[in-house]
Image: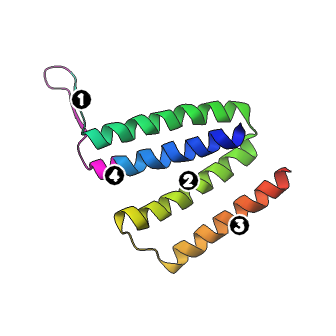
Amino acid sequence: MKLVLIIIYILCSTGGMTLMKMGGDTLRLSFKGGIYFSMGTLTFFGFVLYLISFLLWQRMLVRYQLSSLVPMVSGSVQVVILLLGHFVFGENLKPMALLGALLVVSGIVLMGFAAR
């Protein structure tokens, strides 16, 4: 169950960030004549996914060991975002970024073995 929650969290978190970036600068908040709030469709769905990821994160923090959960999940999110930035948005992948991602993945694997 832990692995399923982690995978869903990573998908919701990275999907939410990706959709919010794709939605662009469509978020509007105004306080003139009351509170007015609007956002584009992609931004809205990104916001919903990110909200789901926040709720999952809170649940996982309560249930699982903090010292292993946070580095493993945060590192995984960083690597997935790095790849999404390159493949979805055409951002440059520099050699040092790839080396950093490789080190993060190595650390996640080592922590996984240590947890067993």
Asked if the residue under mark 3 is in contact with the one under mark 2, i.e. CB atoms within 8 Å, the reply is no
Categorize mark 3 by other alpha carbons within 10 Å: few (<14), some (14-19), many (20+): few
Asked if the residue under mark 2 is in contact with the one under mark 1, i.e. CB atoms within 8 Å, the reply is no
Q: Is residue 22 left or right of residue 96?
A: left
Q: CA distance from mark 4 to mark 1?
A: 18 Å
Dot 1: what SS? strand
Query: Tag on residue 77?
Result: 2
Query: Tag on residue 37?
Result: 1
Asked if the residue under mark 3 is in contact with the one under mark 1, i.e. CB atoms within 8 Å, the reply is no
Name the residue carrying label 3. Answer: 106
In the picture, residue 96 is in which quadrant? bottom right
Q: CA distance from mark 1 to mark 2?
A: 29 Å
Dot 3: what SS? helix
Name the residue carrying label 4. Answer: 21
Residue visible at 63% across and 38% down in the picture = 5
| Between discs 4 and 1, the one toward the N terminus | 4
Residue visible at 67% across and 52% down in the picture = 72
- Does 95 sit above or below residue 34? below
Name the outermost residue toward the right: 116
Q: CA distance from mark 3 to mark 4?
A: 28 Å
Specify the amino acid type for callout 4: Lys
Specify the amino acid type for callout 3: Ser
| Between discs 1 and 2, the one toward the N terminus | 1
